[in-house]
């Protein structure tokens, strides 16, 4: 069984989130949570929150032990971009793009756990 959590409109650019997501994809959920705690990137805190939410969803559905689950899918999509104006010299203006992200994490029951529980 799978457990899923989605965070939409996160105020961090998708490029910054992807470099952290790539590091936790395929790891056990408990190990990923520990490693996220020590990443220096600001997006690691946001991803840790989403991962905790996916683990809580698994616990509530009684799918499996959340710590033994594995990060099956982890991806980031680009959300809407907020455009802001910044005044410059001689009446000109620059556009500042404030990007947003949609973060999706899918946890799956670990294969070793699934084989052991069926026997």
Image: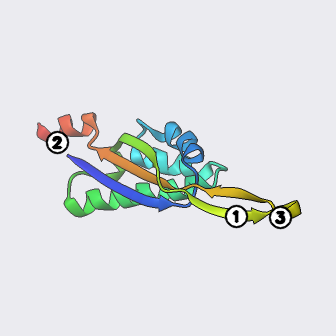
x, y percent for residue 77: 44, 46
Left or right: where 43 falls relative to 89: left
x, y percent for residue 89: 88, 61
Structural crowding at the residue carrying mark 2, measured as other residues with C-alpha within 10 Å and reported as few (<14), some (14–19) or many (≥20): few
x, y percent for residue 22: 50, 37
At a point 20% along the width and 39% down the height, the residue shown is: 114
At a point 42% along the width and 43% down the height, the residue shown is: 75
User: Tag 2 or tag 1, which sits nearer the N-term?
Assistant: 1
Give the numbered dot on residue 91: 3
Q: CA distance from mark 3 to mark 2?
A: 69 Å
Which of the pair 88/81 is nearer the observer?
88
User: Tag 2 or tag 3, which sits nearer the N-term?
Assistant: 3
Q: Which residue is mark 2?
A: 117
- Mark 2 secondary-structure assignment: helix
- Mark 3 secondary-structure assignment: helix
The mark lying in front, picked from 1 and 2, is 1
Q: Assess whether mark 2 and mark 3 are in contact (beta carbons under 8 angstroms).
A: no
Q: CA distance from mark 1 to mark 2?
A: 58 Å
Q: Which residue is mark 1?
A: 85
Q: Assess whether mark 3 and mark 1 are in contact (beta carbons under 8 angstroms).
A: no
């Amino acid at each position: 069984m799978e457990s899923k959590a989605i965070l939409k409109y996160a105020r961090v650019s998708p490029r910054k989130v992807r470099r952290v997501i790539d590091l936790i994809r395929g790891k056990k959920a408990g190990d990923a949570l520990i490693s996220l705690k020590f990443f220096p990137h600001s997006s690691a805190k946001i991803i840790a929150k989403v991962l905790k939410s996916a683990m809580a969803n698994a616990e509530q559905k009684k799918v499996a032990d959340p710590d033994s689950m594995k990060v099956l899918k982890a991806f980031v999509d680009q959300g809407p971009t907020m455009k802001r104006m910044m005044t410059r010299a001689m009446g000109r203006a620059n556009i500042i793009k404030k990007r947003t992200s949609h973060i999706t994490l899918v946890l799956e029951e670990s294969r070793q756990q699934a084989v052991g529980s069926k026997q």
